[in-house]
Image (spheres, rainbow, N blue to C red):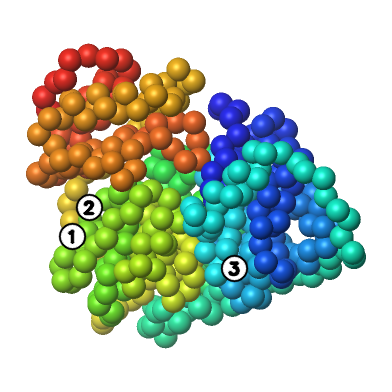
């Protein structure tokens, strides 16, 4: 792990006790709150052990500044967004490092609309944070603190998006791995409200991760067999702040995060016609599903805020990112593992009999995706990284290039994306095509070109 404080327009992330300390978190929180209009501030956190320390430090600082604080406690990130909106707060903060390993923590920022802060609103916060502390006049009086549990409101909104009675009739047995994050707070009551028998793993939100927290096939290899062993019809895996969901079949086959969004989009479009929005690293499965329903699929830069911006601009009925993050406008403009679970169960329970999840997955477009990452050393950042990306473009001369976010190259039957991560000091490489051979060749070429200058080579 590289201990670099990652600071962006929508949050920050770092290793606790290293680049990220309570003092740094308070300074960032104040840089955000100082530019908000009057009104309370919602503060939530995922289950990480050090979350309470950051919550207390930020709360005390805001109270001293005269701000009222609404304490959402340990809550899923989408739940925090709902509390911000329902309480008509001036903004909100979620203490979370999302899928990062246990030593990390961070902050996510919410606007008064209950969505992750858009880039334009975040730029002045970055400037204020980097400018350092300025003298602060004492507040006329300290703020107040009260607790609000947004779980019931969140569950109610999700239930309104599906046929609850149809799901309840099936009495499905569901494996739910909350990963010792905040997911159990909303995931368990939702599934119980849907009449499911739930087998819970990692249900205590204490941050004591039993596997690496990002719900990838590699990280879940030892856990997937447990789905079949307990007789569950489906396996759900949340990330620590419960805004992402991965899915596995009854026999423990990982169908992944990319399929989560594709399945959710298929469910919504079967009922409601309208535009779809995905980011530029999302599988083409979702675009093909949108085409089947005769609706447009718009593409944004990577990042939840960018997807939401595009959804609002196009009036999208569903959207999200291929990392398992589904955004449903009828619930909240935040990625949400809870609505993802409900939509998938709804699809399984339509018709005269339960449709197994592996059958639903088999109906998705057949594409092969591979993701890779390269540690971003100081000598490969900035201008050097830009030069490396230019070399990648030159290595695929017949591809159509797009610089919306990093470099995306499209050719008949496939595409490649190379971009710097917003949350980690790494370069992400994503490729997708109709064959694993083509994907492996594209990834290998990108890796080789990024490693150092060489003559352009034709795409394999």
User: Label 2: which residue?
Assistant: 284
Estimate how packed mark 1 is, as few (under 14), some (14 to 19) or many (20 or more) residues with alpha carbons within 10 Å.
Answer: some
User: Label 3: which residue?
Assistant: 112
Vertical position of residue 72 compared to residue 134: above or below: below
First along the sequence among labels 3 and 2: 3
Vertical position of residue 447 compared to residue 76: above or below: above
Q: Quadrant of residue 293?
A: bottom left
160 sits left or right of 354 in the view: right
395 sits left or right of 373 in the view: left
Residue at position x 43%, y 50% in the image: 303
Query: Which image quarter is the N terminus in?
Result: top right
Say what secondary structure mark 3 lies in: loop
* Mark 3 to mark 1 CA distance (whole Å): 34 Å
Residue at position x 32%, y 57% in the image: 278
Whole-percent x and y of residue 277? 31, 62
Q: Quadrant of residue 454?
A: top left
230 sits left or right of 15 in the view: left
156 sits left or right of 353 in the view: right
Q: Are marks 2 and 1 in contact (CB under 8 Å)?
A: yes
Estimate how packed mark 3 is, as few (under 14), some (14 to 19) or many (20 or more) residues with alpha carbons within 10 Å.
Answer: many
Q: Are marks 3 and 2 in contact (CB under 8 Å)?
A: no
User: Label 1: which residue?
Assistant: 288
Vertical position of residue 90 compared to residue 22: above or below: below
* Mark 3 to mark 2 CA distance (whole Å): 33 Å
Q: Is residue 248 visible?
A: no
Whole-percent x and y of residue 267? 30, 72
């Amino acid at each position: 792990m590289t201990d670099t404080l990652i600071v962006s327009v929508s949050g920050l992330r770092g290793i606790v006790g290293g680049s990220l300390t309570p003092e740094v978190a308070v300074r960032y929180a104040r840089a955000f709150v100082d530019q908000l209009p009057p009104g309370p501030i919602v503060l939530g956190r995922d289950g990480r052990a050090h979350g309470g320390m950051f919550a207390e430090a930020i709360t005390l600082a805001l109270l001293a500044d005269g701000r009222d604080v609404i304490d959402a406690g340990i809550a899923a990130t989408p739940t925090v967004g709902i509390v911000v909106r329902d309480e008509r707060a001036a903004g909100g903060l979620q203490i979370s490092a999302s899928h990062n390993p246990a030593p990390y923590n961070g902050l996510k920022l919410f606007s008064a609309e209950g969505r992750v802060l858009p880039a334009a609103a975040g730029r002045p916060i970055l400037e204020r944070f980097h400018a350092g502390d300025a003298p602060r006049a004492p507040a006329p009086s300290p703020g107040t603190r009260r607790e609000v549990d947004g779980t019931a409101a969140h569950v109610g909104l999700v239930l309104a998006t599906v046929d609850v009675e149809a799901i309840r009739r099936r009495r499905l047995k569901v494996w739910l791995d909350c990963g010792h994050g905040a997911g159990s707070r909303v995931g368990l009551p939702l599934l119980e409200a849907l009449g499911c028998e739930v087998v819970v793993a990692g249900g205590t939100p204490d941050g004591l991760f039993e596997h690496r927290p990002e719900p990838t096939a590699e990280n879940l290899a030892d856990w997937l067999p447990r789905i079949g062993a307990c007789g569950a019809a489906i396996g759900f895996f949340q990330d620590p702040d419960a805004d992402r969901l991965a899915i596995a079949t009854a026999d423990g086959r990982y169908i992944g995060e990319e399929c989560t969004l594709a399945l959710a989009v298929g469910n919504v479009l079967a009922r409601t016609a309208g535009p779809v929005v995905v980011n530029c690293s999302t599988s083409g499965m979702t675009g093909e599903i949108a085409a089947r329903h005769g609706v447009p699929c718009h593409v944004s830069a990577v990042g939840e805020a960018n997807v939401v911006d595009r959804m609002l601009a196009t009036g999208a009925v569903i959207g999200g990112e291929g990392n398992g993050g589904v955004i449903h406008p009828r619930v909240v403009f935040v990625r949400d593992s809870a609505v993802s679970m409900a939509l998938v169960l709804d699809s399984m329970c339509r018709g005269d009999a339960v449709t197994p999840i592996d059958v639903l997955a088999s109906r998705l477009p057949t594409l092969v995706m591979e993701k890779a990452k390269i540690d971003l050393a100081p000598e490969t950042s900035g201008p050097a990284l830009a030069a490396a990306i230019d070399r990648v473009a030159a290595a695929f001369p017949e591809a159509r290039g797009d610089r919306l976010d990093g470099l995306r190259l499209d050719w008949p039957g496939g595409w490649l994306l190379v971009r710097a991560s917003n949350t980690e000091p790494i370069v992400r490489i994503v490729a997708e095509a109709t064959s694993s051979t083509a994907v492996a060749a594209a990834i290998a070429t990108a890796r080789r070109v990024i490693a150092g200058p060489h003559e352009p080579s034709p795409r394999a």
